[in-house]
Image (tube, rainbow, N blue to C red):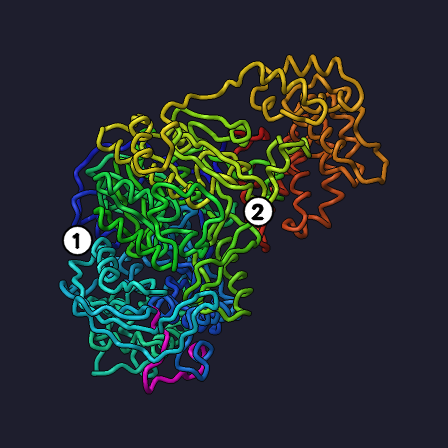
Amino acid sequence: MKRSMQTMLTPPILRHQLSALAAILVLGLAHVPVRAASVIESARNIPIAASADVVVVGGSSAAVAAAVAGAEGGAKVFLIAPRTYLGEDLAGTMRLWLEGGEKPSGGLAEAIFGQQTFVTPGKVKQALEDALVAAKVKFLYGSYPADVLTDGQQKACGVVIANRSGRQAVLGKVIIDATQNATVVRQAGAKFTPLAAGPHKIRWVTIAAGSRTDAGQKVRKLALPLETSRKFKSTATYGWWEYTLRVDLADGSWQARARLEQQVRDLTYHATQLYSSDVPFVLPTDAIVAEKPAGGTGFDAASADLAPFRPAGADRLWVLGGCAGVPRAQVEALLRPVAFMAIGQRIGKAAAEEAKGIQPAASPRVVRKGVEASAPGEIRDALGSLASWAKSVPQDQGPLPILGQYDVVVVGGGTAGAPAGIGAARQGAKTLVIEYLHGLGGVGTLGLIGGHWYGNKVGFNNQIPMNPTEKRMEWLRSELRKAGGDIWFGVAGCGVVVEGRRVTGVVVATPYGRGVVLAKTVIDGTGNADVAIAAGADYVYLDDPRDMFVIQAAHLPHRNPGDHYVNNNTAPFDDANPAAATEFFLNRRKALSAGSPFDVGQLVDSRERRRIVGDYHYDLLDMLNKRTFPDTIEYARSDYDIHGGPTHVFFRFGTIPGISELFRFHGPVLWAYVPYRCLLPKGLEGILVTGIGMGADRNAMPVLRMQPDMQNQGYAAGVAAAMAVKAGVTPRQVDVKALQRHLVEVGNIATEVLTHTDSYPLPEEKITAAAASAGKDFQGVQVLLAQSEKALPLVRQAYAGATGETKLNYASILGLIGDASGLSTLLEALPDVKTRERISATQVRAMAALGYAGDRRAVPSLVKLLGNWNCHVSAAEALGRIGDPAAAEALSALIRRQRNSDRKDQTRNLRFVTIVWALWRCGDKDDIAKTELRSFADGGSGPRSSLVANFARKLLDANTAKRATP
């Protein structure tokens, strides 16, 4: 199995002593206190994702104003936003009103507020997106600044960004740093005034029926309109509350900033809360040393000198935020919406003018200094490009600072990740949960699926309160805090530290830059196996062209105060690709805006993502055959809730009496014992994967992925991780029986599980009975597929003695098991080449069986069927599974005939992708398949384009026509 993105592996390094000061200055983390440890990152190449005249880093309203003004000034502009929306200074802090005397004066401010003094978060986000689209500014969500690119004269010429795809470079002539903490100019080495330690002024906004004053908080009730969800029933009167607090910020480190947010939430949460800010509004006390200090006693955006927004001695850089070189007394006035957007517009115009006199950098690179480290390990990240065949820039070897050391680090605080953190912390492990959103719980909270469709509602799951959404999020957060766990919101995992095959830490992208968190055990709770894949884990996702036709639907909800359950289906996309995510949010938010929601969700409720190949890979047949395991940690239950379509070979048999009804919507409930081994990535130590990134077949996930089961599984993973730390072993060496006994005590699993053994191999009498009955209506075929080695002689014998339709059924069973004994019967069942009649299900099954059987003698007959428009795709798929070069010429000719119509929109005609895949499997012909795959890999518009691109890249990266299977 090959990964979809090339992973750069660093060579082993020697243990050294750190020169802490050098590491801090080089990485631009000058606001981080001196630390005594780092890990060396080896030299490597960073793929280029984009280039522009002006690069705007940050997603504030002022950042958008600058980007639009730059584009209007003739510059090519690219904007990088850390969140999944724009307007973090307004929508993120919930400071959505104008104070007395503030009036929009045209431009972006007027587009947002119009003639009103109040606007909803949804309106802010939509207006800012509309402005960028209208100005033809390209932008990317979910990305953090990681490094500054410099040219031969050591002048800034772009940035490196970190996201779920790894890292990419964005080239630019001028950079506008619109981050909250001036992260980019810090990375560039700019000088700052000292940070004032001690209490900082914080503003925080909530929507609740009351407010908190128990700790001396200053609270202002805002006279703002509020309409709660029509589904929300309450007799209480809800309102807006603005808290002003003084909270200690010990230093300028990310760790201190993360603690501050948790303290603010501790001091302001009210039991009736329906909504709150994502992030606290913090007035920074440090600032750049500017080209020219600002004067005066007040701030006027229209007339203010722009020199204070330029770091001293740093050309081509602008600071657009609270760390600009204005007097600290003027910062709050600068950050008010109308003034902030006005100054952003002026800076964007100036940056565009400046860019006109600058030539593109000839040799951009990431310069690092310092080669010493006090911690061993090599850093791996998926250096994935957002355009598959982009060029790259070199990065020097250099240190990444260690931001923390923990027993257990959980990356992803969602449905399974938050319970994992609680499970680990309750067992006494020093635990950190990293979550890129600003709330725990995943699809059940910020994903607004606040009800349980099915799931085994027992044990740990029963402790979690249901609704409203904020109540569930706060319970998870407070329980983790009570148990001693730390939480870092607004942080994404973007790599790992490994020693050999053991994961010893994670690389994180914070708003303050990248760093390393060391861990004795890592839990990947991303739901997409992001961390495990970066470490080198094999995974399953879009390994078969049929997957792209039926991958389960995604969903992005609207959110009104009081909403807790909003569920729907929208087209799926590649979650791990920030470009695809940006397009998804843009299109979906636009569609939802017609209903004027208060807000739109920040989390895509994806039902299907990448899944590891674990020590055990749970299969649909395990469920159908009611398989038990000695290491069961979860007992899952659901109807077959598939929001797409099945692809398992089992479903090739069609309707099976007594079985097919199990897969109806609202059909009978299915149960599944889930073994611990599904959480262990094959070949890796020190890491567990929980949630829908677990090791399982996609066809089993519609039953396994229910929230109660994922929550209980996550809790089990956390307990296992803590047990591993306490015993000084890896998760693979944990005493599973001890783990099971604890899970029995808390009610997650039944006592009987303690005595279970593996029920495979199935009894011979059951296999014999299945072989005897399957020829009539495929009854028992799930047994034959699961125990094919023992079943084959019996099925061959039954086939030899059968006649008519029964003989054809046995031939199909043999073929789909991978045996060609029934070849002649299957060939006789193929449709006539020239028939114009609809192809029957039996004929489709016969073609599939020939493909799975893999016998080249079937190739001539299947090649002929490529000329029949009713079945050419099924024939091509079968040829692709056989992989005979003899079919390449005919497949090439078919592609030539179809490319003019099908290639125009690959997202609508995925059948064309199947034919290209088949040619690739058959050895290609004149590089026709490679040409098409590269075209697919470069992406396109449409909800499925990212899936096609992902699939194409996997084939090209593998450099082989052999189909990857778990």
Label 1: which residue? 33
x, y percent for residue 92: 36, 65
For the point 60% across and 39% down, the residue is 663
The answer to whether residue 403 is above or below residue 701 is below
Q: Point out the stretch of residues depicted in magenta.
A: 94-109
The answer to whether residue 121 is above or below residue 255 is below
Label the magenta part by its dominant secondary structure. Answer: loop
Badge 1 amino acid: Pro
| Horizontal side, residue 811 vs residue 423: left or right | right
Looking at this rendering, what residue extends furthest in the left direction? 198
Label 2: which residue? 643
Q: Is residue 152 visible?
A: no
The numbered mark, 1 or 2, whose residue comes first in the sequence reads 1
- Neighbour tally class for label 2: few under 14, some 14-19, many 20 plus, Cα within 10 Å: some
State the image quarter where residue 14 is shown. Answer: top left
The answer to whether residue 149 is above or below residue 962 is below
Q: CA distance from mark 1 to mark 2?
A: 49 Å
Badge 2 amino acid: His
Foreground: 590 or 223? Answer: 223
